[in-house]
Amino acid sequence: MKALIIKYKPVIKFIFTFLIVYGVLSVAYNYYLDASKDGKYYPDFITNLVANQSKDLLENVGYSTQVLPHPDEPSVKLIINGKYLARVIEGCNGTSIIILFISFIIAFSGQFKTTLFYILAGSVLIYIVNLLRIVILSIGLYHYPWRREELHTVVFPAIIYGMVFLLWMFWVNRFSKVNKSNG
């Protein structure tokens, strides 16, 4: 049994590190969401920010856009040219995906400065790609409303999770200690 544990020590370390970091960041994020319920921004600051930045990007490409708090649920309504198209909910703000990304990078950590820089750069890149994903989804829903299901459940999750996967693979192959010790 001890030989088996020694053999799989890197895997066990990765799993425990990932779960601990993911758990801590998720609990902190849920605390933030709970604390945001009575705050100035509805539904929370990050979701509000993402909705407003999506609005700005849509307006920059020529769409008259409004964002309004949803009266019945914690979300922001996205309206293009007077047509209610979508709602931006907490799950759309990219924070949960960034938490997943950070947890993986720390579990496969490299040198401290490199890991920190990659976490910051990757998080910003994921945030930007998420904004672009919302903008493209909104334009797609505006012009092709009959493709709503395919756009929302297949194409756009593939964009954001595909980006995270590519960032992970780049990290493991280029910077992580795991790659350095095997090569």
Image: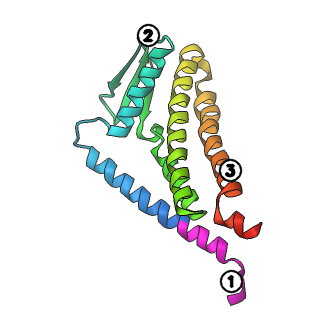
Q: Nearer the viewer, residue 54 or 36?
A: 54
- Tag 2 residue: 81
Foreground mark, 1 or 3, reads 3
Estimate the x, y position of residue 31 in percent, counting from the top left. Answer: 32, 54
Give the spatial CA distance, label 1 vs label 3.
Answer: 27 Å
Where 104 falls versus 40 (above or below)? below
Q: Are marks 2 and 3 in contact (CB under 8 Å)?
A: no
Image-based side of 91 in relation to 16, left or right: left
Is label 3 in a helix, a strand or a loop?
helix
Disc 3 marks a residue whose amino acid type is Phe
Give the spatial CA distance, label 2 vs label 3.
Answer: 40 Å
Q: Earlier in the sequence, mark 1 or mark 3?
A: 1
Q: Looking at the image, which residue sits at the far right?
A: 183
- Tag 1 residue: 6
* Stretch of the chain drawn in magenta: 1-17
Q: Earlier in the sequence, mark 2 or mark 3?
A: 2
- Quarter where residue 174 is shown: bottom right
- Tag 3 residue: 170
Q: Nearer the viewer, residue 5 or 76?
A: 5
